[in-house]
Amino acid sequence: MTSALELLPAVDVRDGQAVRLVHGESGTETSYGSPLEAALAWQRSGAEWLHLVDLDAAFGTGDNRQLVREVTEAMDIKVELSGGIRDDASLAAALATGCTRVNLGTAALETPEWVAKVIAEHGDKIAVGLDVRGTTLRGRGWTRDGGDLYETLARLDSEGCARYVVTDIAKDGTLEGPNLELLRNVCAATDKPVVASGGVSSLDDLRALSGLVPLGVEGAIVGKALYAKAFTLEEALQAVAG
Ligand SMILES: O=C(O)c1ccccc1N[C@@H]1O[C@H](COP(=O)(O)O)[C@@H](O)[C@H]1O
């Protein structure tokens, strides 16, 4: 029996606020108030995971490290932590929050030896975010090209990377539906589980992603659709229940 698609409601933090961006572009923020309140609301609604992103750390405009730690520590559910985790100190700080796993983006593009080392040390506590435009990876707050998706995926697979979080930047924050073709292609290129990110707009999108579970899609990050109240998290969890 295949498992149900996992849902990871997102809380992206910029300047102390929960925000959503469009295409991940700085300056497109819509603010949704307290990150802790948002995270607690998703937990109360039945989430088993929280995808928590320090956007300032990802963009290099400071960090929300203290706040991210407070949110993570307040959660009874699993937390996937992203944004600005690029060296031993930031990784140690992220893991010290008690998060379930971290998601590395820029580091996988710019310091591959370090990423190989931490994959070897921490196993499935490390996921790698493959944030793409077309098939070109983007790092540093999605502002810089960082190589070919499939070459990087092959390298990370050979290093034992446990899981990938695949974001189609062109879809992120747009409510245009996920890039199912990209997800199928990535699943065909790796045996490792894939978490889909970007574009979810409806319960039908979640059902379509559920249809990719047998191919290797393990979960889906949901952001804008929840904040825009396109559906509730309870409805989403019901829609993907096995
Ligand atoms: O999630 C976003 O909307 C986003 C927008 C712009 C840049 C990054 C974004 N998200 C997360 O940031 C990490 C990458 O951070 P880093 O490169 O490791 O510092 C990425 O995995 C996304 O989860």
Image (spheres, grey):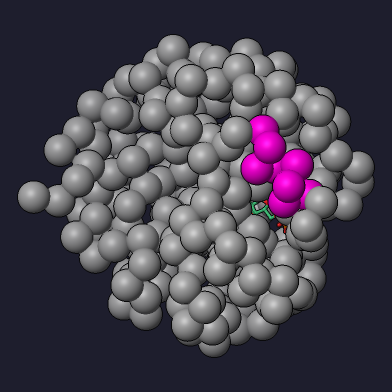
Whole-percent x and y of residue 17? 76, 25
Q: Does 17 sit left or right of 1 as displayed? A: right
Classify the position of the C terminus by image quarter.
Answer: top left
Comparing 63 with 31, the one in front is 63
The residue range painted magenta reads 90-97
Residue 235 lies, with reference to residue 165, above or below; the image says: above
- Can residue 153 be spotted in the picture? no
Whole-percent x and y of residue 103? 60, 53
Q: Does 37 sit left or right of 198 as displayed? A: right
- Can residue 197 be spotted in the picture? yes
Residue at the farthest left position: 1
Whole-percent x and y of residue 123? 50, 60
Whole-percent x and y of residue 131? 60, 63
Question: Which residue is at a point 72% across and 30% down the rendered structure image?
Answer: 68
Q: Is residue 91 magenta?
A: yes
Question: Which residue is at a point 80% across and 34% down the rendered structure image?
Answer: 65
Comparing 169 with 58, the one in front is 58
Q: Is residue 218 magenta?
A: no
Image quadrant in which you'd find residue 137: bottom right
> How many numbered marks does the figure carry?
0
Question: Which residue is at a point 49% across and 68% down the rendered structure image?
Answer: 161
Question: Which residue is at a point 88% across and 52% down the rendered structure image?
Answer: 60
Examine the residues drawn in magenta and state their main secondary structure.
Answer: helix
Comparing 89 with 72, the one in front is 89
Residue 216 lies, with reference to residue 17, above or below; the image says: below
